[in-house]
């Protein structure tokens, strides 16, 4: 059974072009050109992934992403025409799985959707490989375990909850400390370095936490 992809794009020619490329790779594309039609369609059809443009008539992509996240964890890839918009989107904590900037190659878009689907589907089938024990502050990985400090555990939790998703330093900092203390980027980076070393010890040297230049960090396994 092919994956169902919802393309939400008001540029009809671009939407049709993307749909043609997805069909060539055995995906089932569905097109919506107006933001007000999206929520009801998603609830009724439950697509496997959503390619969501920000600038839409009716509800914009930011509002739609927020509303979808209230009832679904479907992978969402946000599309923007501005490179510098991506930093703002990350700061909004929308819960999108990836961000694509126009102009783009349709082949690149298909590849990015495939990558997100691989990550999410892999997580669903490999829960036994990687797990967290919050009561003991322990990480289990492929039959091995290692203890973390409380701060390291709180740092890992959001990354673990959404593998592949980029988290900014500010997002991770807010999750690490409940007392709203102010810490700088070097503090976050220092904790990440220690956490990476510990995870490497139980994963045969794999670099499970990746740095994304200018954006933040993500967990990949």
Image (cartoon, helix red, strand yellow):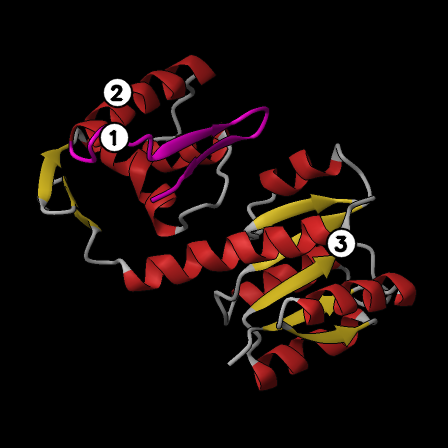
Q: Secondary structure at mark 3?
A: helix
Label 3: how many Cα within 10 Å (few below 14, some 14–19, many 20+): some
Tell me where residue 17 sits by quadrant.
bottom right
Which image quarter is the C terminus in? top left
Give the foreground label among 2 and 1. Answer: 2
Report how far apart the C-alphas of labels 3 and 1 lie in the structure.
39 Å
Gap in angstroms between the C-alphas marked 2 and 1: 8 Å
Q: Residue furthest bottom?
A: 44
Q: Which comes sooner in the sequence, label 3 or label 1?
A: 3
At x 76%, y 69%, the residue is 19
Q: Residues within 10 Å of mark 1 (few under 14, many from 20)?
A: some
Kindly identify which residue carries mark 1: 152
Depth check, front residue: 51 or 142: 142
Q: Position of residue 14 (x, y in %)?
A: 86, 61
In the shown orientation, is residue 161 left or right of residue 59? left
Q: Earlier in the sequence, mark 3 or mark 2?
A: 3
Residue at the disc numbered 3? 106
CB contact under 8 Å: marks 3 and 1: no
Height in image: 41 above or below 54? below
Q: Which residues are magenta?
A: 202-221
Residue 217 falls within the magenta-colored stretch: yes
- Magenta stretch mostly in which secondary structure? loop
Query: Is residue 178 visible to us here?
Result: no
**Left or right of residue 64, residue 182 in this image:** left
Mark carried by residue 93? none
Q: Which residue is mark 2?
A: 194
Q: Residue at x 30, y 38 (%)?
A: 156
Verify CB contact (< 8 Å) between mark 2 and mark 1: yes
Residue 201 figure quarter: top left
x and y, in percent, of residue 62 in the image: 69, 55
How far across and down, in percent of the image, does residue 111 sit? Answer: 61, 52
Q: Upstream in the sequence, badge 2 or badge 1?
A: 1
């Amino acid at each position: 059974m092919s994956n169902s992809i919802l393309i939400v794009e008001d540029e009809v020619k671009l939407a049709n072009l993307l749909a043609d490329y997805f069909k060539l790779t055995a995906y089932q594309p569905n097109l919506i050109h107006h933001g007000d039609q999206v929520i009801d369609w998603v609830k009724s059809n439950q697509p496997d992934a959503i390619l969501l443009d920000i600038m839409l008539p009716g509800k914009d992509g930011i509002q739609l992403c927020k509303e979808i996240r209230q009832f679904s964890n479907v992978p969402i890839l946000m599309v923007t025409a501005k490179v510098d918009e991506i930093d703002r989107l990350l700061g909004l904590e929308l819960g999108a799985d990836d961000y694509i900037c126009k102009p783009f190659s349709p082949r690149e878009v298909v590849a990015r959707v495939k990558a997100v689907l691989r990550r999410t589907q892999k997580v669903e089938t490999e829960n036994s490989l990687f797990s967290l024990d919050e009561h003991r502050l322990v990480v289990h990985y492929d039959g091995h375990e290692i203890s973390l400090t409380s701060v390291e555990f709180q740092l890992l939790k959001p990354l673990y909850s959404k593998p592949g998703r980029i988290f900014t330093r500010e997002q991770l900092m807010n999750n690490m400390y409940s007392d709203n203390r102010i810490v700088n980027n070097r503090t976050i980076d220092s904790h990440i370095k220690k956490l990476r070393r510990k995870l490497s010890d139980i994963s045969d040297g794999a670099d499970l936490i990746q740095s994304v230049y200018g954006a933040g960090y993500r967990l990949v396994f």
